[in-house]
Amino acid sequence: MRVMAQLAMVMNLDKCIGCHTCSVTCKQAWTNRTGMEYVWFNNVETRPGLGYPRRYEDQETWQGGWVRKANGHLALRAGGRLKKLLHIFSNPKMPGIEDYYEPWTYDYETLLNAPQQANFPVARPYSLISGKPMNVSWSANWDDDLGGSVEHGHQDVMLKGIEDKVKFEFEKTFMFYLPRICEHCLNPACAASCPSGAIYKRSEDGIVLVDQDKCRGWRMCISGCPYKKVYFNHKTGKAEKCTFCYPRVEVGIPTVCSETCVGRLRYIGIMLYDADAVLAAASVEDEHDLYAAQLACFLDPQDPEVERQAELAGIPADWVDAAKRSPVRRLILDYKVALPLHPEYRTMPMVWYIPPLSPVVDVVKDTGYDAEDKDNLFAAIDTLRIPMEYLANLFTAGDIGPVNDVLKKLAAMRSYMRDLNLGRDTRPEIPAAVGMTEEDIYEMFRLLAIAKYADRYVIPTAHAEQAHSLEEIATDCAVSAYGGGNNEPFGTGSGQQVRIAVEDLRVRSDRMKDDVS
């Protein structure tokens, strides 16, 4: 057993309203620089839909993630070292700018300075890459609220095999929102794909980062990532990706996307896992077993042996305590209502999702029956094949069983809490029907519905004794020389230098006091 700690995130899709606040705030914090105009570390997709970049889930085309060979070993789908060496100067397995979208701005000068005239002036779109006039034909959220799905939705990779069961008429469709960030995988294919070794997984918290000094712009990481969450900065010639807001989590505050989420749907916490078990779990033969195999990698922080091994591994005691209180662990392991995104890629993702139940409730309601009654809800889940199969393609490699179990637990929680809120006698048979106790149902309800800030984010602070490189004072960002937050050459699109964050100021002040004492 080799105990390691991993920062993980869970998102409750039932609470996502598709407002894109997380995307915008992440954009302003991390990718509002020249060369990053098309980049969204966080994006929100409408499902069904093509996603961003377009059809990124089509691994037959993009060759991302891992595949299991006949001998049981894992290999990169895009090929090993020899193949990458042969294509190192020309990588065809990579989305083009048309798959992301060509970023644009508008001719505001014409609009603002136009003289008085009979016709209203128009601000034409201009490309931020070429500077030439362009017609807007695609963007990061083109499917937003099915805006483009009527025309393009049939190309959704997840509809393969169930095309006839999903209708794109607005009154018949099944629709929900899927926020996405880098998965910070336990077995990251992007890191394995990099010829320069520039992408690494931090041993302290499992965050996957790009070393800007080592990056040579080969872009093999873009091909290797099956989620297409690694991007190329065409101004710096470097790869960039979601950093899990490590300067924030190191001081104990959540990521920007979590902090600003209107629906309060994100949870962040520590998971302890056995690093020696990851490869075997990712190599299981049947794709339907990958979800259970990943669950088996996680360790119980309450176990005295796990605590002892964590101490031997150098994991601080307060991190183990945070793992015991982790909302992510409760949702993934205790209640088993959170599922990984595309486990069939064999990267062991660590951003998990609670699938939405709302469409099931709506269907029951339309029949005229009580939409909160346990029996009606369970029956609807069993018969409503459209979302079940679609969600299974997203979260369990097509296995309907775990998705069915999750939806039944969520339905049982609604039915049980309805009796409690209306002052009626509770029915213990409801949680028993889904393998839970009344206490479990109630605690799960509190965590999913009314959890406070401190309950949703249990983030231990970084320790100086872990690694000096974690300290913000010793952290350097190579893109700063190209306009990363200042007005040096090429920094015209990044604005003025920003003030030091309040939390950083507090932390540094405390550190100075400790040094004086």
Image (tube, rainbow, N blue to C red):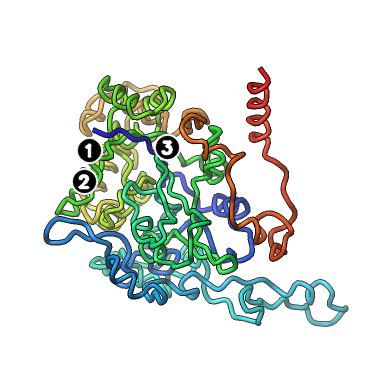
Where does residue 38 sit, x and y in percent of width and height?
A: 55, 66
Q: What residue lies at 42% left-to-right and 38% top-to-bottom?
A: 205
User: In this rendering, would 463 be left or right of 227?
Assistant: right
Q: Are marks 2 and 1 in contact (CB under 8 Å)?
A: yes
Q: Which mark is residue 204?
A: 3
Dot 2 lies on which element? helix
Q: What residue lies at 37% left-to-right and 55% top-to-bottom?
A: 191
Query: Dot 1 corresponds to which residue?
Result: 296
Q: Quadrant of the N terminus?
A: top left
Local packing at callout 2 (Cα closer than 10 Å; few below 14, some 14-19, many 20+) is many
Which amino acid, by three-letter code, is at mark 2? Ala
User: In this rendering, would 512 be left or right of 259?
Assistant: right
Q: Which mark is residue 281?
A: 2
Q: Is residue 10 visible?
A: no
Q: Is residue 512 visible?
A: yes
Q: CA distance from mark 3 to mark 1?
A: 21 Å
Q: CA distance from mark 2 to mark 1?
A: 8 Å
Local packing at callout 3 (Cα closer than 10 Å; few below 14, some 14-19, many 20+) is some
Say which of 365 and 387 sits in front: 387
Count how many numbered circles sit on residues in the image: 3
Say which of 372 and 23 sits in front: 23
Q: Quadrant of the C terminus?
A: top right
Above or below 323: residue 395: below
Dot 3 lies on which element? loop
Which amino acid, by three-letter code, is at mark 3? Glu
Where does residue 253 sit, x and y in percent of width and height?
A: 55, 35
